[in-house]
């Protein structure tokens, strides 16, 4: 697939989803700060910003609640739940399931792929008609239970696959702190020599995605800017609400 806006051709579907997320973050950020210039997708850095006077880099990175340098367990769980629902949707439609919108609660569910065909068959049997519209299906094992909230869709919707897990979007907002932000800026700055092979200056955009529990932060604007560690500027985007310059 090719994203026509950026001309980006991903190698794997995961790369495609990642780039679509980055595109959404960057579009939101540019609109909030009122900048209007061309962007060219790249790697190292993520984008090249094209202005009438110069070309500079724009690197995008995510801020996660529990990432202390070795990855975010919360984000990993969210990704596993999302992949589980994508596989479930594919199995459901391969078995002849009719168009369905689904919202799931999987917090205590083992995400065992062997259970997917069983769940898909039950979804087919319990899918509500257009007259009924809504239904709830509970699937149990000896130690766990999952709840699926179902909405029957018209045939014209086709294989509707935007199935959501509520657990991924429920949680308390953490407060940002200088040490966490500085650690992330410093880590990304290690790649600046690589970026300078293409552009002289690179700006860093840190994204706290409020749509996911793993990235839900509450930020209090600072009175002074943080060290930028070599980036021309550093911004924090609380997606999709607000942006601040922090370095």
Image (cartoon, grey):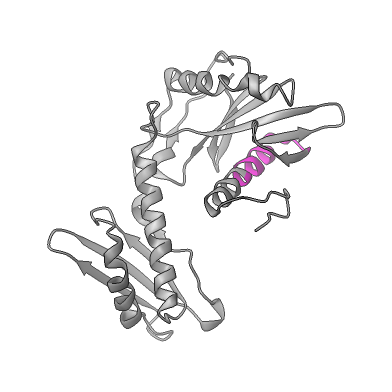
**Is 69 situated above or below 37?**
above
Residue at 41% of width from left, 49% of height from top? 79
Q: Quadrant of the N terminus?
A: bottom right
Quadrant of residue 240 within the rendered picture: top right
Which quadrant holds the C terminus?
Answer: top right
Number of labels in the image equals 0
Indicate left or right for 40 with 220 as reference: right
Mark yes or no: residue 215 visible.
yes
Seen from the viewer's position, the closer of residues 69 and 210 is 69
**Left or right of residue 109, residue 177 in this image:** right
Task: Name the image quarter holding residue 88.
Answer: bottom left
Residue 95: x and y, percent? 40, 79
- The answer to whether one can see residue 169 in this image is no
Place of residue 132 in the rendered image (x, y in percent of width and height, measured from the top left): 37, 83
The residue sitting at the right extreme is 52
In the depicted structure, whether residue 213 falls above or below residue 236: below
Q: Position of residue 127 (x, y in %)?
A: 36, 79
What's drawn in magenta, residue-wise?
Answer: 23-37
Q: Find out whether residue 115 is within the magenta segment.
A: no
Residue 142 image-quadrant placement: bottom left
Query: Looking at this view, is 79 or 147 the one in front?
Result: 79
């Amino acid at each position: 697939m090719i994203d026509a806006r950026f001309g980006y051709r991903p190698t794997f579907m995961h790369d495609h989803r990642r780039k679509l997320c980055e595109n959404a973050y960057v579009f939101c950020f540019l609109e909030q700060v009122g900048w209007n210039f061309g962007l060219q997708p790249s790697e190292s850095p993520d984008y090249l910003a094209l202005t009438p006077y110069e070309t500079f880099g724009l690197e995008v990175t995510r801020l996660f609640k529990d990432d202390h340098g070795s990855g975010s367990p919360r984000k990993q769980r969210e990704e596993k739940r999302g992949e589980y629902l994508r596989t479930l949707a594919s199995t459901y439609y391969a078995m002849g399931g009719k168009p369905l919108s689904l919202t799931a609660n999987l917090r205590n569910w083992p995400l065992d792929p062997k259970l997917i065909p069983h769940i898909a068959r039950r979804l087919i049997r319990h899918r509500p008609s257009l007259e009924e519209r809504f239904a709830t299906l509970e699937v149990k094992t000896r130690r766990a239970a999952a709840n699926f909230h179902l909405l029957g869709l018209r045939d014209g919707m086709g294989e509707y696959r935007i199935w959501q897990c509520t657990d991924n979007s429920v949680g308390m907002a953490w407060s940002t702190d200088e040490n966490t932000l500085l650690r992330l800026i410093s880590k990304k700055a290690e790649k600046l020599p690589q970026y300078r092979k293409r552009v002289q200056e690179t700006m860093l955009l840190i994204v706290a995605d409020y749509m996911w529990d793993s990235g839900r932060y509450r930020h209090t604007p600072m009175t002074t800017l943080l060290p930028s560690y070599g980036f021309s500027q550093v911004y924090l985007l609380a997606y999709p609400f607000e942006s601040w310059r922090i370095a």
